[in-house]
């Protein structure tokens, strides 16, 4: 088994590509050990000192560190991922879903058409780019011209995430949806 690694815009996060599917649907953000209880692999990754976050995408795993050098952490993480896949153990524990109860959306029913356009733009133009950087972005709400988005994985806490939201995503949405005045993280 050969696992590729890629840097992300977040220097504290590295992207691991096992060459096999990770999640069939959705994404799963585990920013702490408690959340990692959903996955045997995530639990093992959190056993490595200085691992502070794990994120699963469709075909990648991102790992965030508190500090330390990737040169020392990377072999431990690669070994853990490889051992997990070679064991044949599942990625998620039985009954675990990738959804989250805090993913509730809010918007006025009168804005449904606008929200549908915003969601389509995020799904087709923004999410693929964010996934390339080892993260995910989801629509959370729309109120008074403000779009609320949630960034996960490598994008959560990334130094450039504010610029991504403010300049990239906000400009895109404002161009296609005149009702949008601002984009904010949640």
Image (tube, helix red, strand yellow):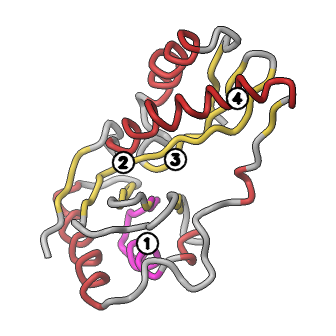
The picture quadrant where one finds residue 94 is bottom right
Q: Nearer the viewer, residue 36 or 85?
A: 85
Q: Position of residue 34 (x, y in %)?
A: 60, 71
Compare marks 3 and 1 and give the one earlier in the sequence. 1
> Answer yes or no: do the residues labelled 2 and 4 have beta carbons within 8 Å?
no
Left or right of 148, for residue 144 = right
* Quarter residue 139 falls in: top right
The residue at which mark 1 appears reads as 46
Q: Is residue 50 above or below residue 48?
A: above
Q: Nearer the viewer, mark 2 or mark 4?
A: 4
Q: Which residue is mark 4?
A: 115
- Frontmost of labels 4 and 3 is 4
Q: Classify 10 Å Cα crowding around label 4: few (below 14), some (14-19), many (20 and above).
A: many
Label 4–label 1 contact, CB within 8 A? no
Residue 55's x, y, as percent? 45, 59
Residue at mark 3: 152
């Amino acid at each position: 088994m050969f696992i590729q690694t890629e840097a992300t815009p977040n220097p504290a996060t590295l992207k691991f590509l096992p060459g096999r599917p990770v999640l069939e649907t959705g994404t799963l953000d585990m920013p702490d050990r408690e959340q990692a209880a959903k996955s045997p692999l995530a639990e093992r990754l959190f056993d490595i000192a200085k691992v502070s976050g794990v994120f699963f995408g469709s075909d990648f795993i991102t790992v965030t560190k508190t500090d330390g050098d990737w040169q020392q952490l990377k072999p431990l993480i690669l070994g853990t991922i490889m051992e997990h896949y070679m064991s044949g153990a599942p990625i998620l524990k039985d009954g675990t879903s990738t959804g989250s109860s805090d993913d509730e959306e809010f918007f006025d029913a009168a804005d449904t058409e606008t929200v549908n356009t915003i969601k389509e733009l995020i799904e087709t133009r923004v999410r693929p780019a964010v996934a390339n950087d080892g993260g995910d972005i989801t629509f959370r709400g729309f109120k008074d011209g403000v779009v609320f988005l949630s960034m996960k994985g490598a994008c959560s806490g990334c130094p450039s995430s504010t610029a991504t939201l403010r300049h990239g995503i906000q400009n895109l949405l404002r161009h296609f949806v005149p009702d949008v005045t601002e984009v904010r993280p949640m």
